[in-house]
Image (cartoon, rainbow, N blue to C red):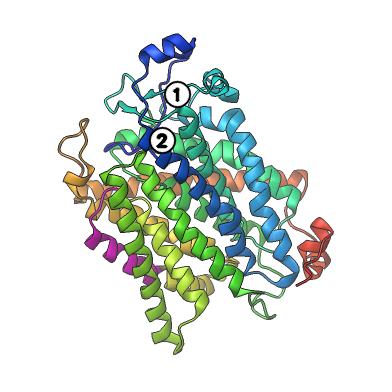
Amino acid sequence: MPRLPAAVAAVAAVSLAGFSTPASAADAAPPIDTGDTAWMLVSTALVLMMTIPGLALFYAGMVRRKNVLATLMQSFAICCIVTVVWMVAGYSLTFGNGTPYIGDLSRFMLNGIGAHIAKGADIGFTLGAGTPNATTMTIPESIYMMFQMTFAIITPALITGAFAERMKFSALCAFTVLWSLLVYAPVAHWVWSPLGWVAGLGAIDFAGGTVVHINAGVAGLVTALVLGKRVGYGQDDLSPFNLTYAVIGASLLWVGWFGFNAGSALGANGRAGMAMATTQIAAAAAGVGWMVAEWARTGKPTVLGIISGAVGGLVAITPAAGYVLPGSALIIGLLAGVICFWTATSLKHMLGYDDSLDAFGVHGIGGIVGALLTGVFAYGPLSATDANPAGISGSLKQLGVQAEAVAVTIVWCAVVSFVLLKIIDAAIGLRVSRDDEQEGLDMTQHGERINI
């Protein structure tokens, strides 16, 4: 995500007139930085790797054998569906001019960048031209669009962990399209567009604590509650089929997260380097935090526990990565590991909801922890830019602003997700039958079976 002190912003005011011809684009565009461009190409590929195969394997390793292929299919299909949705309207609704609440359709079907892509011309563009947070990027818009697409892809894919093993594939497809347009795009516009109203509050989100993780975690919790518990939950053996898959998936997520966070500096620069360092530190600290908490409680540290903790740390540092120092990253990671452990192992059972793979426990809670602690630990000189020479420092005021951003994200996501689920349930049904669930989604939804 673009890193701006008041908004961590995007392409909200790119003028179509300014891209009317290659000549006028070249005249208006700043020079392209090949180093920044190369880094953003790599970052984009790394973030895409987080979903396929990273998240796909992470989730597939934690379900039962009869649902492995269906779980892999969910991440892969979402990658395909959201790519089309983002190209047609998602990018424009997120980063078009519009209002403080939603972008316009000036980039519908990627209108305005197609000619430049076809001719292979490098273009630069101004983010939020005419706004107090205006800045100039030195990468082609096509790369920025693709980078943002990978974030839009992984967010609904994260949700699938909450309702694993019981949702119709047709309902998943419909929900993915509608949720991407009506939940993800508006929240991303609020937070990352310079025109967004949450950005106007002064809330900061470096790489997606609110937009990606709280959004996905809350939607996952709502979906799990609407669908109800899995057949046999609390009685049958629901243990993971193959934790080797999960470890490989978590490892791919960890490596890909450097594209997620360090790539959000939008260039090969000092902020990218600091974001990479804080990401590594927080992930490791959270892995240790979860492991120690589990060891103390149960007497044995588990493989599933340490990889879940590391992912929780990656989630928590996401909104803070480009705004905090390494010492703060260590604290954020340790706290996230312990808090996510408590949520996944105690709170879930106390309240009785079936968050199958702890999508809410890790992403929702981790995102909330990270977003709030960003307001505590933000280091002014690190977040300073020409637009805001003083930077943004941790304070009670900033913590309050962060809390407001968290609250509005939770409310919007919960309400709209609930309404969408009820509409889809009435139209085509959400949940597979009891018999289909017991047989497994691999066969009943896709007519295939794993042979391993």
Residue in the picture at 30% in, 62% down: 332
Q: Which residues are magenta?
A: 320-339
The quadrant in which residue 90 appears is top right
Q: Tell me the crowding category of disc 2: few under 14, some 14 to 19, or many 20 or more residues within 10 angstroms, Cα based.
A: many
The quadrant in which residue 132 appears is top left
Q: On the image, numbered disc 1 is attached to which residue?
A: 122
Q: Tell me if 250 is positioned left or right of 371 in this view.
A: right
User: Considering the numbered disc 2 on the image, is that residue within a helix, a strand or a loop?
Assistant: helix
- Check disc 2 and give the amino acid type: Thr
The quadrant in which residue 99 appears is top left
- Where residue 230 sits in the image (x, y, percent)? 69, 68
Quarter the C terminus occupies:
bottom right
User: Considering the numbered disc 1 on the image, is that residue within a helix, a strand or a loop?
Assistant: loop
Is 334 contained in the magenta span? yes
Quarter the N terminus occupies:
top left
Residue in the picture at 16% in, 45% down: 381
Against 436, residue 103 (above or below) is above
Q: Tell me the crowding category of disc 1: few under 14, some 14 to 19, or many 20 or more residues within 10 angstroms, Cα based.
A: many
Lower position in the chain sequence, tag 2 or tag 1: 2
- Check disc 1 and give the amino acid type: Asp
Residue in the picture at 30% in, 25% down: 134
- Where residue 329 sits in the image (x, y, percent)? 28, 60
Q: Tell me if 403 is positioned left or right of 365 in this view.
A: left
Q: Are marks 2 and 1 in contact (CB under 8 Å)?
A: yes
Residue in the picture at 43% in, 49% down: 259
Q: On the image, numbered disc 2 is attached to which residue?
A: 37
Q: Main secondary structure of the magenta part?
A: helix
